[in-house]
Image: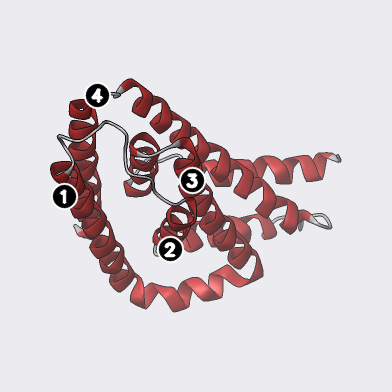
């Protein structure tokens, strides 16, 4: 790999980690799903979030600056939609924990496809991602110009970085679930998870948060 393409890969990896590593409501939800259900469900959720980041990276390469201008006027509404969805998820998590607190520690099965689509949709509701990737793409192109194939390589690197971090969160949640084997442990972990998701959802719509 040439030095130019190596720099592109490095830039893409940093971009992917930069958007994925800050743990917000999405990261908390991935950990929660993995801890309360299984590694498979958590991994599906993680890949859903990473897919959204990858799609936004593609859009940024194809014309992110223009799309960011279109999205900006409705970014507030998108945040409120994300807030509503996350609050519903937090409420359902708490409700299920209360309903099943005296049952067996084995959690009810959850579908990987549903987890994937839920996290894909929630992550796509974050318009900041397209602005972030769009700015990075414009910055790269402001230089001497990227080498041939650089855009595809940059998108792939950004996706790999995001996926690796989200899968790390899922693995952490799965290990947490193995530690919390008792019904009481699962109950309180679900309650705490619900509270964390609710707080992070509120922070989405609180000015200056």
Q: Report the number of numbered marks.
A: 4
As measured in the structure, the alpha-carbon distance from the residue carrying label 4 to the one carrying label 2 is 32 Å
Task: Label 3, secondary structure: give it.
Answer: helix
Residue 50 or residue 179, whichever sits in front: 179
Q: What residue sits right under mark 3 in the picture?
A: 46
Q: Residue at x 56, y 55 (%)?
A: 51
Q: Residue at x 56, y 44 (%)?
A: 163
As measured in the structure, the alpha-carbon distance from the residue carrying label 2 to the one carrying label 1 is 23 Å
* For residue 206, above or below residue 166: below
Residue 162, given in percent of the width and then of the height, sits at 55, 44
Tell which circle, 3 or 2, labels the residue nearer the N-terminal end: 3
Residue 100, given in percent of the width and then of the height, sits at 18, 41
Q: Quadrant of residue 161?
A: top right
Tell which circle, 3 or 4, labels the residue nearer the N-terminal end: 3
Task: Label 1, secondary structure: give it.
Answer: helix
Q: What residue sits right under mark 4 in the picture?
A: 182
Asked whether residue 100 is in view, the answer is yes
Q: Nearer the viewer, mark 4 or mark 1?
A: 4
As measured in the structure, the alpha-carbon distance from the residue carrying label 1 to the one carrying label 3 is 24 Å
Task: Label 4, secondary structure: give it.
Answer: loop
In the rendered structure, the answer to whether residue 194 lies left or right of residue 49 reads left
As measured in the structure, the alpha-carbon distance from the residue carrying label 4 to the one carrying label 1 is 18 Å
């Amino acid at each position: 790999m040439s030095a130019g393409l190596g720099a592109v890969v490095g830039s893409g990896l940093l971009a992917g980690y930069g958007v994925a590593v800050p743990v917000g409501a999405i990261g908390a939800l991935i950990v929660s799903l993995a801890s309360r259900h299984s590694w498979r469900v958590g991994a599906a959720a993680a890949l859903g979030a990473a897919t959204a980041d990858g799609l936004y990276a593609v859009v940024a390469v194809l014309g992110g600056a223009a799309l960011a201008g279109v999205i900006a006027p409705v970014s507030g509404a998108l945040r409120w939609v994300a807030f509503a969805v996350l609050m519903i998820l937090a409420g359902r998590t708490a409700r299920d924990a209360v309903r099943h607190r005296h049952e067996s520690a084995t959690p009810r099965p959850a579908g990987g496809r549903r987890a994937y689509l839920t996290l894909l949709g929630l992550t796509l509701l974050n318009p900041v991602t397209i602005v972030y990737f769009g700015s990075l793409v414009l910055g790269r192109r402001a230089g001497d110009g990227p080498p041939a194939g650089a855009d595809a390589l940059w998108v792939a690197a950004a996706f790999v970085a995001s996926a690796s971090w989200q899968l790390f969160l899922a693995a952490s949640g799965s290990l947490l679930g193995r530690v919390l084997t008792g019904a009481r442990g699962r109950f309180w972990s679900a309650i705490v998870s619900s509270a964390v998701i609710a707080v992070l959802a509120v922070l989405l719509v609180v000015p200056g948060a």
